[in-house]
Each structure stands twice: as C-alpha cells, then as structure tokens.
C-alpha cells in the first residue's frame, strides 16, 4: 500500500478515535453541563428552562444520536459556543493557537541550536572538561522544575534587573524568558542523544572507509556521521514538538501567555467542555501530522527505510 494512502487511512482512524474521546469528555464529566451553561450559581433558573436547553442541545436523545450530531458539527468545524466568552469555540482556539505556535516554534529553534552546539562539542571532545561541563548542564536542566526556573528568571531579569517583561507577548522581548525556561528543560535529552549518536556513528565502518579514502573530515561529518545520527534525534524532536503544540501549560500560565494550554486549563475550571473537546481534536490531529512528517523525514535521511518498506509490500 502506498505511504500516502496508508497515512490517509491512519489519519481517518485517528480522527474518529479523537472525536469519540472528546465526545466522552462531555458524557463522563462531573456535574451537569446544562447547569454550567445556565450559570445556575449566579442566576436562578426553572426546571422548564433546564429541560428546554437539554432538548435544544439534544441531550435527551440516545447517546449514538448525540455522537452523530457532534461528529457532524466537528466535520463542519463547529464546536459550539464558548461558555466563557460567548464566542464560537473555533474563534477562541484560532485566537490562542498562534501564541502557542510561536512559543513552540521559537523554543524548538533554540533547542536545535543548543543541541547541535553542546552535543557536537561533547562528541568532539569526549571525556574532557567540555564533555563533563555539558553533562552537568544536562543534569541540571533535567532536574530543575520548569515552573521554578521560570519564576527564577522572572525574579532575576524582570524584578531585579528590569531587563525583560515578566508576562505577555506584547513585544518580542516577552518571548525570551519563556523560551529560555522551556529550552533548558527540553534540550538535555537531545544533547545526550546527539552526543551518543555522533560518537557511535564516527566509529562505523563506512566512516572509517571514507577516512581511509582521504575524504576531508568536514565532508565525512556532513554526509555520513551527522546524517546517520539524526534519525533518533528527529524522533524525539517530533514527540516534543507535539507536546509543545498541546500547550506548554505551566509556562503559559507562569508567564501569562494566552495560548491553547492556558485556554484549556481555564475551560476545564469553568466546565467549558466545548473548548476542551475542540482542544483534544485539534491538538491531537496536529500531533498526528507531526508524526507523519517525522516518518517522512526518516525516508529522506535514510533511503534504506523506504526500500525496506517496498520489500515488505
């Protein structure tokens, strides 16, 4: 089966599972969604009003009919109205998503730079002071909680030095602290993986054969060593980018960034289940697309993977 058709079938199946999970969020959620919509805590409502709203939303229908109605709305891009703002759910998501995409994109760019610089240095000078210093950085980055690091950065650069804003993305400077906090937390495993992969690749037969033929070291590194080391790094990068798209909740809340993670937490607190359902489906499909691109990158980095797939077919 061609890869494109397989991806389409997998995407359709994954989409169905996501819609089913997000539908069950409303069915299994504690409390009564109708009471939340009517704001019964602040406004007195009658039983007739509650029943009328249930009838309007189709909550008195069998579950399979409710799911069919929900699925039809999802296919049209209609997740209903947000209880928090009274605006369409997709409008709220489209407002919040650019902030998360911007934060995720800049963070991954910084992570890639840090990974190649520190991982490359550690692999180039193994068992030296440089290698040990990189190892200390990795252990510290993995051990420090992201929210605590974020608070430390705010205290130092915003409160004490007054160099950078402590919250929001009104200017590009607002990206600096959340990006640094995320990059320090995310980069350590990438650095360790790249270091190990580069050391292993440099000792393989095709690399030694290239050296024996007199090929220049920069050419060997670019065409052989680095390319062979990228597959495990691309795998974990894809997983982490999917997690970032899901909303870096702690960082968004700490730095007051109005992204999808912060929006989802607020929606859960207020029982705004339409936003939660849309969040699950949109982010889930985003993660699927990222994994598909990771799979495609394998075939570009290592053509042997495509040949093995063709042989199995």
Image (tube, grey):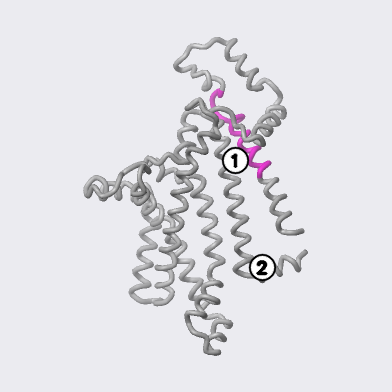
The residue that appears at 52% across and 28% down in the rendered structure is: 87
Asked whether, in this view, residue 73 is left or right of residue 235, the answer is right
Q: Nearer the viewer, residue 241 or 232?
A: 241
Q: Which of 52 and 126 is in front in this view?
A: 52
- Disc 1 is placed on an element classified as helix
- Quadrant, the N terminus: bottom right
Residue 305, label in figure = 2
The residue that appears at 50% across and 42% down in the rendered structure is: 97
Q: Residue furthest front?
A: 171
What is the count of numbered marks? 2
Horizontal and vertical percent for residue 272?
52, 29
Region rendered in magenta? 15-33
Asked if disc 1 and disc 2 are in contact, CB closer than 8 Å, the reply is no
Asked whether, in this view, residue 79 is left or right of residue 185, the answer is right
Q: Name the residue under label 1.
A: 281
The residue that appears at 37% across and 52% down in the rendered structure is: 181
Residue 28 highlighted magenta (yes or no): yes
Q: Main secondary structure of the magenta part?
A: helix
């Amino acid at each position: 089966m061609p890869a494109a058709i397989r991806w389409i079938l997998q995407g359709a199946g994954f989409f169905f599972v996501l819609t089913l999970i997000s539908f069950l969020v409303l069915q299994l959620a504690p409390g009564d969604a109708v009471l939340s919509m009517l704001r019964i805590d602040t406004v007195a409502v009658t039983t007739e009003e509650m029943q009328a709203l249930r009838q309007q939303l189709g909550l008195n229908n069998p579950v399979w009919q409710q799911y069919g109605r929900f699925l039809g709305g999802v296919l049209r891009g209609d997740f209903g109205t947000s209880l928090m703002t009274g605006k369409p759910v997709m409008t709220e998501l489209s407002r919040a998503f650019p902030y998360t995409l911007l934060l995720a994109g800049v963070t991954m760019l910084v992570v890639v730079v840090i990974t190649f610089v520190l991982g490359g240095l550690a692999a180039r000078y193994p068992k030296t002071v440089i290698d040990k210093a990189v190892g200390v950085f990795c252990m510290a980055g993995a051990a420090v909680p992201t929210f605590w690091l974020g608070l430390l950065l705010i205290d130092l650069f915003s409160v004490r030095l007054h160099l950078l804003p402590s919250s929001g993305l009104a200017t590009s400077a607002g990206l600096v602290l959340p990006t640094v906090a995320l990059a320090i937390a995310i980069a350590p495993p990438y650095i360790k993986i790249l270091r190990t992969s580069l050391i292993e690749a440099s000792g393989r037969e095709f690399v030694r054969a290239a050296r024996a033929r007199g090929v220049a070291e920069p050419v060997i590194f670019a065409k052989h060593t680095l390319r062979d080391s990228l597959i495990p790094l691309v795998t974990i990068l894809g997983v982490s980018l999917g997690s970032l798209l899901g909303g870096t909740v702690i960082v968004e809340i700490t730095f007051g960034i109005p992204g999808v993670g912060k929006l989802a937490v607020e929606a859960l607190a207020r029982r705004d289940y339409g936003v939660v359902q849309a969040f699950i489906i949109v982010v889930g499909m985003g993660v699927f697309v990222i994994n598909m691109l990771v799979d495609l990158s394998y075939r570009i980095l290592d053509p042997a993977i495509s040949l093995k797939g063709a042989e199995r077919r």
